Image (cartoon, rainbow, N blue to C red):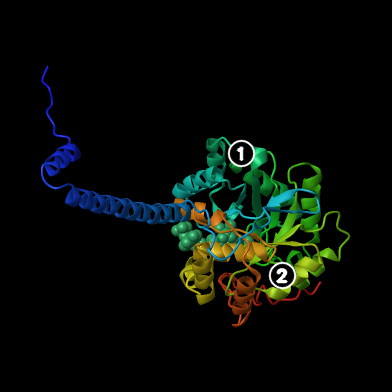
């Protein structure tokens, strides 16, 4: 067995010094001690800074907002209660334009991160992938809020149930938590651009069919999308069994619609904010808005989290879409913005002329603007 030979440094040093004078030895020891204390203190300080930086950046990566040094941030509602008594989660993953080969991973990432709400539609052409991801995730069906939407071609009462069944089958579920009339525009049977003027002016026959499907247990809540106030009034003037529980509309920094937000609150209607980040076209500009940047900086959150929080604080459900795993996780975490910062952002959003990101009126060859039109029925 070989033995290791080493020289205990401090002892030897001391012994050597002993042969000469004791006073310089004591002075040297003090100096070394002082040096060691300073070195240890410096190492501890640098470590503290490092740990703090790592923890901040990992919190941001994990999507957990890092609370600002000067502000105590509280939480926002995790859900709203609809007239049916069902609780709709306030943040959903939107899946429009989420490609078939990406949407499954996005849904699985979202469910793992804690999302409890997926906003889809028949026309997004990815319901089968969404359903598969839901099953793969192992999350029980009743723990996830699933929304789908009735497309414009299927408004004729005799077509509504078959359209719903296609979505149910693709999603692999027996029921939807929410089914919306996607647009207040009905196309004639079999066409995707010939307007059915009668059903567009008066969607009550379509609505009555949806009410029946609620009673049949295939849908838990029904609502509308892209309806303006006159269209909502037009529909609710009928003897409805179930009032629209939500209206899903474009709400973002560029098109904040404060009047509609106020009207919806007064009329017990939950709004869902679609294209909340400004959609693909405007997301960069949204995240660079000075007020959004200022909130993010002050609170130690990301600009996307600042905007998504603003939506929930306005009292709306918010539907950010992402297929980027880190963003999916980031977007779930909302915090209550301090009143002054919230008000500044609200004022900035209302300070410019509203500009929509989504308006298919021209693309569908309509002679009117869907959002400004007042139904004649
Ligand atoms: N009812 C309707 O008529 C209607 C109309 C439009 C939308 N919607 C619903 O609303 C959902 C959202 O609307 P949207 O898809 O138009 O737009 P959005 O959610 O406002 O924006 C989506 C864009 O933002 C990017 N993004 C997401 N999170 C981000 C983050 N944290 N940082 C930076 N970029 C980020 C996405 O990129 P990546 O995906 O590449 O990450 C994508 O390009 C839709 O998916 C759909 O469910 C409904």
Q: Residue 284 carries which label?
A: none
Label 2 lies in ligand 1 vicinity (Cβ under 8 Å): no
Label whose residue precedes the other's in the sequence (1 or 2):
1
Which residue in the rendered view is the most extreme toward the top? 1
Q: In which quarter of the image is residue 192?
A: bottom right
Tell me, yes or no, if residue 324 can be seen here.
Answer: no
Q: Measured along the vertical axis of the image, is residue 295 above or below residue 246?
A: below
Question: Where residue 222 sits: x, y (%)?
Answer: 75, 53
Tell me, yes or no, if residue 79 can be seen here.
Answer: yes
Q: Which of 325 and 21 is in front in this view?
A: 21
For discs 1 and 2, the disc positioned in front in the rendered view = 2
Q: Which of 306 and 116 is in front in this view?
A: 306
Kindly report the distance in space between the C-alpha atoms of the residues bearing marks 1 and 2. 34 Å
Q: Which of 219 and 90 is in front in this view?
A: 90
Q: Which residue is drawn at 59% across and 79% down?
A: 348
Q: Measured along the vertical axis of the image, is residue 375 above or below residue 100?
A: below
Instruction: Please identify the quadrant where the N terminus is shown.
Output: top left
Which residue in the rendered view is the most extreme toward the right? 239
Question: Where residue 68 sits: x, y (%)?
Answer: 53, 63
Q: Which of 298 and 306 is in front in this view?
A: 298
Q: Residue 172 carries which label?
A: 1
- For label 2, the SS is helix
Relative to 30, 192 lies left or right: right
- For label 1, the SS is loop
Which residue matches tag 2?
261
Relative to 50, 71 lies left or right: right
Instruction: Please identify the quadrant where the C terminus is shown.
Output: bottom right
Q: Measured along the vertical axis of the image, is residue 261 above or below residue 107?
A: below
Question: Where residue 40 sits: x, y (%)?
Answer: 32, 50
């Amino acid at each position: 067995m070989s033995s290791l030979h080493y020289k205990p440094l401090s002892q030897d040093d001391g012994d050597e010094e002993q042969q000469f004078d004791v006073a310089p030895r004591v002075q040297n020891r003090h100096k070394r001690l002082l040096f060691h204390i300073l070195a240890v203190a410096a190492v501890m300080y640098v470590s503290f800074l490092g740990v703090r930086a790592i923890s901040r950046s990992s919190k941001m990566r994990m999507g957990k907002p890092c609370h600002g040094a000067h502000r105590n941030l509280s939480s926002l509602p995790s859900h709203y209660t609809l007239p049916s008594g069902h609780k709709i989660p306030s943040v959903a993953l939107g899946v429009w334009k989420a490609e078939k080969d990406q949407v499954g991973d996005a849904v699985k990432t979202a469910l793992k991160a804690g999302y409890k709400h997926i906003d889809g539609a028949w026309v997004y052409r990815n319901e089968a992938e969404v359903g598969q991801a839901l099953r793969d995730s192992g999350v029980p069906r009743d723990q996830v809020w699933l929304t789908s939407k009735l497309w414009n071609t299927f408004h004729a009462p005799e077509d509504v149930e078959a359209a719903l069944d296609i979505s149910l089958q693709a999603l692999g579920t027996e029921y939807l938590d929410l089914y919306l009339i996607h647009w207040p525009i009905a196309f004639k049977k079999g066409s995707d651009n010939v307007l059915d003027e009668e059903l567009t002016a008066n969607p009550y026959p379509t609505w009555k069919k949806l009410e029946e499907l609620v009673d049949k247990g295939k849908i838990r809540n029904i609502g509308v999308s892209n309806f303006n106030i006159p269209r909502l009034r037009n529909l609710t003037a009928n003897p409805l069994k179930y009032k629209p529980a939500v209206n899903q509309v474009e709400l973002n920094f560029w098109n904040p619609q404060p009047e509609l937000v106020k009207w919806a609150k007064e009329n017990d209607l939950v709004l869902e904010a679609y294209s909340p980040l400004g959609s693909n076209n405007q997301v960069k500009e949204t995240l660079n808005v000075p007020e959004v940047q200022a909130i993010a900086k002050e609170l130690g959150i990301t600009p996307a989290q600042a905007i998504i929080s603003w939506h929930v604080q306005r009292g709306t459900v918010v539907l950010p879409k992402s297929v980027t795993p880190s963003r999916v996780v980031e977007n779930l975490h909302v915090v209550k913005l301090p009143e002054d910062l919230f008000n500044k952002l609200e004022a900035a959003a209302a300070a410019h002329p509203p500009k929509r990101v989504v308006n298919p009126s021209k693309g569908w060859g309509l002679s009117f603007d869907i959002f400004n039109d007042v139904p004649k029925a």
